[in-house]
């Protein structure tokens, strides 16, 4: 990636001589990328993007993907080596303490440095899922050029997601260490880590990212009812991963067949008992939230009780607790219920968050967990960034060594009326993108 003042585009003109003269070129650029995406591979994406973006004066484009633990950026290059090496690979740099990291954390387009009006960092966000950043050269970019960058990044993020499932390159790029088989299964099964509408936001994180041995989460939303589930399988081996995967897949299947919470839990119980004869089980939470009313129903199957953070105070959701699912001790049939208020944040978590101890034997604890969320709420960070920092804090507390999986699912209800679009974007960390192009001078 050349940043020389005399750099030219692939079309042989200086970038400042090639800014768009009309919306036609902007449309042509986005349309050409969409057309090219039908037959492009993930590995071809950077070259295609660079070729087409030159139409609107955006050059020297590099795509950087954030790693699985959201600590590092690595350039999207073809044929990356398998994970497992030590130190930074060529072209990599850290999220913390960098301008690119701030763009990623806050969902903002930022100049590469003080007084630099030529090079820009642009977040890559697919829907509400953060993928990384792009570095773009756009000399003296005005408001219209910055909007072009945002729109280009949104399309590139969509293209990356559409291609990554069929490319091992993506997994090699975002992994820093070798991954065990159970974790390979679980990452493939679970939904994206962040989802949002004007009335609801869901964000989740899981550690250790490469050796998860039994935690899985799931969610789905049909426009009215949000379905949430979290399972923690017994044990810390591949069999625990298989058990968790079987529980999640069975629950998802039952849910899609129209089963209620109790019938879903019964279906998971039946499958696990049939498969493991009571020798393998999961604890878990199955929950439903009606976003039109704020009514929350859930079943607790041997799991830590959920918590609602209301304002600056926690509300502990105690209630009947059924036996773990799959132990052959029966399945729950008593629903717990809570009326949420707009702005409430529902926390589901596994005991690996609260019960883990540091080398001095001190437990992390539920209160420390909640206090961290409350402190960072005042910073007005996007919620996915708050959870990222929570996990980083949790890892640091335990000197980077977790003895059990630590998984958090946060669901924030915004009320039946929902939030204004701009406020929703701020909560998630999506760059502002007006519907109309600024008038050109």
Image: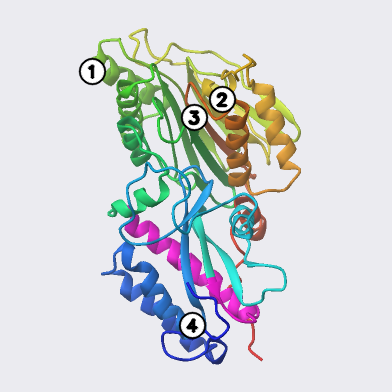
Looking at this view, is 227 or 240 the one in front?
240
Residue with the mark numbered 1: 275
Tell me if residue 220 can be seen: yes
Foreground mark, 1 or 2, reads 2
- Counting residues from the start of the chain, the first of labels 1 and 2 encountered is 1
Residue with the mark numbered 2: 353
Mark 1, Cα crowd under 10 Å, few <14 / some 14-19 / many 20+, is: some
Looking at this view, is 313 or 37 the one in front?
37
Looking at this view, is 301 or 125 the one in front?
125
Q: Are marks 3 and 2 in contact (CB under 8 Å)?
A: no
**Which residue does the image show at 72% across and 48% down from the upper left?**
380
Q: Which residues are magenta?
A: 136-165
Q: Are marks 2 and 4 in contact (CB under 8 Å)?
A: no
Magenta-colored stretch includes residue 368: no
| Alpha carbon separation for disc pair 1 and 3 | 25 Å
Foreground mark, 1 or 3, reads 1
Mark 2, Cα crowd under 10 Å, few <14 / some 14-19 / many 20+, is: many
Tell me if residue 437 can be seen: no
| Alpha carbon separation for disc pair 1 and 2 | 29 Å
| Alpha carbon separation for disc pair 4 and 1 | 56 Å
Secondary structure character of the magenta stretch overall: helix
Q: Position of residue 201 (x, y in %)?
A: 57, 45
- Counting residues from the start of the chain, the first of labels 2 and 4 encountered is 4
In which image quadrant can residue 41 be found? bottom left
Residue 26's mark? 4
Magenta-colored stretch includes residue 157: yes
Residue 287's mark? 3
């Amino acid at each position: 990636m050349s940043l020389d003042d005399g750099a030219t585009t692939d079309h042989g003109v200086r970038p400042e001589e090639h800014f768009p003269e009309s919306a036609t070129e902007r449309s042509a650029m986005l349309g050409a990328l969409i057309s090219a995406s039908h037959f492009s591979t993930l590995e071809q994406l950077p070259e295609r993007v660079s070729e087409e973006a030159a139409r609107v004066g955006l050059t020297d484009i590099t795509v950087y993907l954030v790693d699985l633990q959201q600590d590092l950026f690595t350039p999207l290059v073809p044929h990356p080596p398998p994970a497992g090496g030590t130190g930074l690979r060529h072209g990599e740099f850290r999220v913390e303490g960098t301008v690119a990291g701030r763009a990623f954390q806050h969902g903002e387009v930022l100049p590469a440095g003080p007084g630099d009006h030529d090079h820009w960092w642009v977040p890559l966000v697919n829907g509400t899922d953060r993928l990384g950043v792009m570095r773009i050269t756009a000399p003296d970019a005005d408001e219209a050029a910055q909007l072009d960058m945002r729109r280009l990044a949104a399309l590139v993020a969509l293209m990356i997601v559409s291609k990554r499932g069929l490319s091992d390159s993506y997994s090699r790029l975002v992994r820093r260490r070798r991954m065990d088989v159970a974790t390979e299964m679980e990452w493939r099964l679970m939904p994206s880590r962040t989802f949002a509408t004007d009335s609801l936001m869901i964000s989740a994180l899981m550690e250790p990212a490469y050796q998860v041995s039994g935690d899985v989460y799931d969610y789905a939303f049909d426009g009215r009812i949000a379905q949430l589930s979290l399972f923690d399988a017994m044990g810390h081996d591949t069999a625990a991963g298989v058990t968790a995967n079987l529980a999640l897949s069975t629950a998802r299947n039952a849910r899609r067949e129209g089963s209620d919470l109790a019938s879903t839990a019964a279906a998971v119980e039946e499958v696990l008992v049939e498969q493991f004869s009571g020798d393998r089980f999961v604890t878990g939470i199955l929950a439903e939230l009606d976003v039109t009313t704020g009514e929350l129903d859930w079943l607790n199957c041997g799991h830590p009780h959920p918590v609602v953070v209301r304002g600056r105070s926690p509300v502990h959701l105690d209630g009947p607790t059924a036996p773990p699912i799959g132990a052959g001790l029966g399945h729950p049939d008593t629903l717990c219920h809570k009326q949420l208020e707009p702005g409430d944040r529902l926390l589901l978590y596994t005991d690996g968050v609260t019960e883990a101890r540091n080398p001095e034997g001190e437990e992390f604890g539920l209160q420390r967990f909640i206090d961290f969320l409350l402190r960072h709420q005042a910073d007005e960070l996007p919620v996915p960034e708050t959870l990222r920092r929570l996990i980083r804090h949790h890892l640091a507390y335990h000197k980077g060594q977790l003895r059990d999986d630590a998984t958090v699912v946060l669901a924030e209800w915004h009320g039946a009326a929902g939030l204004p679009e701009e406020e929703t974007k701020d909560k998630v960390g999506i760059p502002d993108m007006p519907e109309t192009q600024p008038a050109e001078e």
